[in-house]
Image: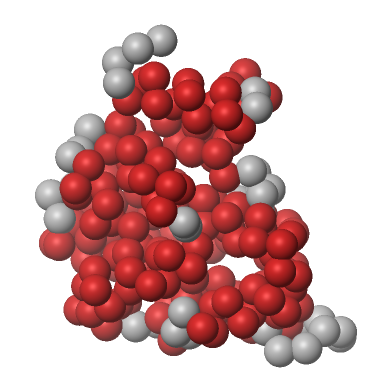
């Protein structure tokens, strides 16, 4: 997957977010940075799939209904102060319950942390990622000559950085790369990932 967005996110907010996440959890700053890096492509991938369902304008409406704003990218302190209850709806706007569970399991496996802690990470990091997406979308839109609102910029980022295959990305999170598993069917990958979590191969 193209990683322009994730690289920009880490450069601009990685240190601050990792510090906040480490203070709120048992993760080390390094683990927190890795978690942000791992989740970013998952968020883009999920939104890419939703874009295929609802269209570019639908993505803008989806983010707006969830209360997501570009200000979240610049107000990381506020994001963490609101905590889990303040941003659970934003996480649900990106990940359905099943995908949240899969993603939390992948984080738990990758960082050797408890499942409960892994689930707490999502509503802490997803709002920052979405806020950055809106901010970058606005910047890209300003440099474009067509489209309306922020949608043109968001769609440009998703088309460039989101491959729409979130289950493959989760497999990549566990493996450190897609490998041959990325070529399997969605069901096959999911079964394979779950077998890793349960200690079977």
Residue drawn at x 41%, y 53% is 97
Residue 109 lies, in percent from the top left, at 30, 32
Residue 79 lies, in percent from the top left, at 30, 77
Residue 175 in view here: no
Quadrant where the N terminus sits is top right
Residue 29 in view here: yes
Specify whether 41 is left or right of 51. left
- Residue 154 appears in which quarter of the rendering? bottom right
| In the image, residue 11 above or below residue 134 | above
| In the image, residue 185 above or below residue 16 | above
Residue drawn at x 28%, y 78% is 86
Specify whether 52 is left or right of 120. right
| In the image, residue 97 above or below residue 127 | above
Q: Nearer the viewer, residue 51 or 96?
A: 96
Residue drawn at x 66%, y 49% is 164
- Residue 199 appears in which quarter of the rendering? top left
Quadrant where the C terminus sits is top left
Residue drawn at x 13%, y 49% is 26
In the rendered image, the residue lying farthest to the top is 201
């Amino acid at each position: 997957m193209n990683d322009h967005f994730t690289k920009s996110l880490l450069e601009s907010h990685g240190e601050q977010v990792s510090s906040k996440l480490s203070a709120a959890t048992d993760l080390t700053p390094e683990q927190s940075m890795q978690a942000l890096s791992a989740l970013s492509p998952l968020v883009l991938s999920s939104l890419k799939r939703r874009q295929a369902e609802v269209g570019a304008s639908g993505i803008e409406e989806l983010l707006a209904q969830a209360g997501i704003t570009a200000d979240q990218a610049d107000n990381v302190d506020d994001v963490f102060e609101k905590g889990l209850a303040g941003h659970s709806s934003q996480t649900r706007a990106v990940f359905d319950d099943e995908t949240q569970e899969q993603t939390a399991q992948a984080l738990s496996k990758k960082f050797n942390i408890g499942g409960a802690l892994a689930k707490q990470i999502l509503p802490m990091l997803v709002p920052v990622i979405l806020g950055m997406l809106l901010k970058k979308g606005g910047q890209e839109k300003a440099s474009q000559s067509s489209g309306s609102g922020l949608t043109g910029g968001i769609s440009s980022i998703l088309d460039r950085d989101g491959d729409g295959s979130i289950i493959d990305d989760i497999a990549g999170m566990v493996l450190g790369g897609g490998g041959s598993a990325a070529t399997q069917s969605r069901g096959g990958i999911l079964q394979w990932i779950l077998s890793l979590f349960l200690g079977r191969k």
